[in-house]
Image (cartoon, grey):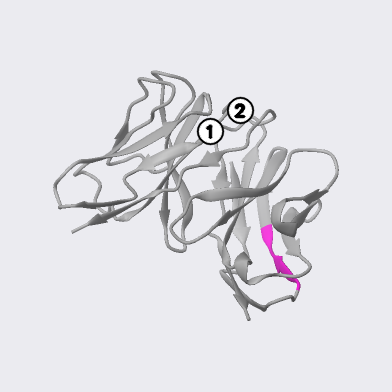
Amino acid sequence: DGGITQSPKYLFRKEGQNVTLSCEQNLNHDAMYWYRQDPGQGLRLIYYSQIVNDFQKGDIAEGYSVSREKKESFPLTVTSAQKNPTAFYLCASSLEIWAGRNTEAFFGQGTRLTVV
Amino acid sequence: AQSVTQLDSQVPVFEEAPVELRCNYSSSVSVYLFWYVQYPNQGLQLLLKYLSGSTLVKGINGFEAEFNKSQTSFHLRKPSVHISDTAEYFCAVQGAGSYQLTFGKGTKLSVIP
């Protein structure tokens, strides 16, 4: 079945540590996204990527980094510079990034990160 | 730039009653509109979308929404809710030529038996 796989589902991190969240898709989508979700805040865009080896900052990129070495993969690293990393992280993909065409975004099941 | 306002953070409703979840948006360009549903600790699933054409859009699970350009609204409706509809619902907007979805803060629908 085609879809987006995020791992792990739950992740605990000590303060000062970097952690990497995995996101893999087999939908052959060009565009991929990372969102952060906090209670009552909706979803906020962290980074997005239109094609391999290219990515752009979203609204809240500080303290995060990404890479896009393969079309299928878009890992997110939460660095120690992120002051409040505890949140639910969602990865998404779409066929193309520009509106007007097939803009439906498919989401993974999320990773819940907790700083302990 | 665009923004989305979901007017109710929580909506309780009795089973088999109708429900409307309200969404208003603002944008300086033409828009595409979406409703997503999220069950606890899960990702988002698309309920329905408006790209163009008929302003009444039907989606999955018996939901529908109506695009009202003059009132800049895209309210979600269901004539008779079920316990399984208990979830959080997000309205999202994408401006023509934009690269991202802008989400509202969500509405938690609680269906009471």
Camera-near label (2 vs 1) is: 1
Residue B32 x, y percent position in the rendering? 69, 41
Residue B95 x, y percent position in the rendering? 65, 38
Could you tell me which chain the residue with mark 2 belongs to?
A
B39 lies above or below A89: below
Which residue position is annotated with label 2? Answer: A98
Q: What's the residue type where badge 1 is placed?
A: Gly
The magenta region covers B18-23
Residue B89 is drawn in which quadrant? bottom right
Residue B79 is left or right of residue A100, and the answer is right
Give the residue drawn at x 79%, y 38%. Answer: B52
Name the one closer to the observer, A39 or A4. Answer: A4
Q: Quadrant of the C terminus of chain B?
A: bottom right
Which residue position is annotated with label 1? Answer: A2
Residue B96 x, y percent position in the rendering? 67, 33
A100 lies above or below B78: above
Residue neighbourhood size for the residue with mark 1, other residues' Cα within 10 Å, grouped as few (<14), some (14–19), many (≥20): few
Q: What's the residue type where badge 2 is placed?
A: Trp
Give the residue drawn at x 75%, y 58%. Answer: B62
Name the one closer to the observer, A62 or A22. Answer: A22
Element type at mark 1: loop
Q: CA distance from mark 2 to mark 1?
A: 22 Å
